[in-house]
Image (cartoon, coloured by chain):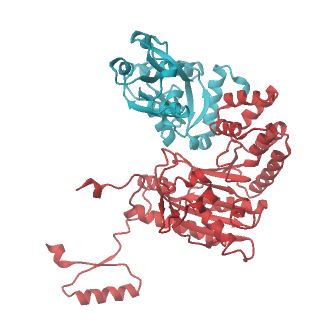
Chain colours: A red, B cyan
Amino acid sequence: MNELISKVPNGMRYYFGAAARRRRAVEDTIMEVFDGWSYEEITTPAVDYLALFELGMGREAANRAFRFTDGDGSLLALRPDVTSSVARATATLFAQRARPLRLCYAASVFRQRPQSHAEWRRESRQLGCEFIGSSESIADMEMLAIATEIFERLGLQDDYRITISSVEVFNGITEELGLDAFGRERMRHLIDIRDAADLQRFLAEYQIPAQDCVAFSRLAQLPGKREVLDEARCVITNKRSRAALVKLEELWRLIEELGLSDVFEIDLGDVSELDYYTALTFKVYLTGAGSRVGGGGRYDRLIANFGKSEPAIGFVLELDALIDVLLRRDIKTPVSADAETDDAQMTSDDPASVLLEARERRRQNERVRVGLKRSENA
Amino acid sequence: MPELTIAVAKGRMQDEALALLERAGVRICAEARNSRRLSVADESGSYRFIFVKPSDVPVYVEHGTADCGIVGRDVLLESNADVLQPLDLRISPCRIAVAACAGVIKSELGALRVATKYPRIASTHFGARGIPVEIIELAGSVELAPVLGLADAIVDVVETGRTLAENGLGIVEVITNSTGRLVVNRASYQLKAEAVAQLIGALRLVLGEGAVCD
């Protein structure tokens, strides 16, 4: 066949058979959990103005989208994320509704340029929820509790880790050092790739006592439990970072009280998406997946782009990354019988009678399969 | 079951990397080392080593097939892989440089044809200087290109500079220095935190950077 017709574009794929069934079942499970926590489903437009996503995600992230022009020349995009659109709806459609708002969604998002080599997909299904109108730790913890419930229900309770951090810890430090945008990005990059030696050298240029450089580099290196916060307090003295540490400690107490401290880690080296998030950030890792399968955080400034400012926190899971891990496990330990075998096969020479019987059985909610006698004999 | 899979760049870096690991207490028995197997375990059974082409190291690590890798900074810059780089192992030092035939001086390089194995590094370098370039991607023996007139200059790794000199080329500009790095997959860093920390700690001690992790 002509390659133009047979070839599937990079980053796109089919799902069928067991994989398609598994994918649907996992999506249903997750949406049930959202529903169980009183999150209302929302469906957003698949095509929207590029300007919306530029406001919502930042220009650079929005520019990864598939873009095209509307009849009047304005730029449109195939949605690269859902939160932007939810934030706009919050400020417009739901402006008058009582707070807090709890919204959830299951939607395919598209990116013309994938984020990294390992995340090769250009179409991916995101399942997410947003909690709008509260900045309290209880809202943060609700998000994290929902995440843990999802992994328990999927039978993955022993295989995932969630790291938490706050962008304000980093923001406080760069403010104290008086870094310009360039220095800030350089420092962010060194923390992000965990290059402790270069980070120490970088900090030393700012007349920071050597022992503090070492302590801080170490802090940004490895994740840990409560002791990370104790160590951080010894090194970090500025007000802004301190306030963030207090908030993290409050959250950690809740995590401990819920008996979840085994699956959580405090990772002050998580400094990605700084311009988007405003306080708590978290990332979800799953054994068997080479990159993270989900994440989220607090984006208290986003909604102000569309109307009045209000606090919000969101969480998103990458369904396709999850499914990849689950399918590879299914192959090792088959769990369900093949769903194609338990239907009733019906054949007759008279099409009307066989279809009548099929309709009757369908009324009883039986699974049927109408046989096509002639072609099967041929 | 090994705790960590480590991808090591084959070639000049391999021996130095294994020697460094040995000083850090990670030993591969001589029999396995001399065999042609591409996947071997260390003596303690904690680590599995795979030996792959340098440019494949970031690929294995970014996908999480290998938890860690040992590879040159030149390869990392070229691949633009999204991996963590916690340690400079200071092995196999070299420079990435622009080189040209003796006599072609920097100010005369206006619009250029550049032959290289590092198209990304080359176009970023000249892009930052506003110099338009035509990148000619080659797989090896890049030094030949200016000699035969295929290109005006090359961007390549330079260790001693002997190959350049013997082909009548000289360094015009050093783009950056490169040494061997330890790289870690982002998910492994969280999910296998203890094993990764142990490896980093042992290597850091050998490198004399004990202070950072005590």
Give the residue displayed 54% in from the left and 28% down from the top: B73
Task: Classify A182 as above or below A102.
Answer: above
Q: Residue at x 48, y 57 (%)?
A: A66
Above/below status of A50 relative to B202: below
Left or right, A174 with reference to B132? right
Instruction: Out of A141 and A269, give the one closest to the viewer.
Output: A269
Residue B95 sits above or below residue B77 on the image = above
Residue B68 position in % (x across, y down): 54, 34
Q: Position of residue B56 (x, y in %)?
A: 44, 34
Q: Locate residue A126: give its quadrant.
A: bottom right
Q: Is residue B62 visible?
A: yes
On-image quarter of the N terminus of chain A: bottom left
Number of dots carrying numbers: 0
For this view, does A201 lie left or right of residue A81? right
Location of residue A250 in the rendering, given as x and y in whole percent from the top left corner: 81, 54
Query: On the rendered image, what quadrant is the C terminus of chain A found in?
Result: bottom left
Percent x, y of residue A153: 58, 63
Q: Is residue B117 visible?
A: no
Left or right side of B101 for B174: right
Q: Taking B28 as reference, is A231 above or below it?
A: below
In this orientation, which residue lies closer to the viewer: B77 or A237? B77
Between B99 and A106, the one lying in front of the other is B99
Residue A128 in which image quadrant: bottom right
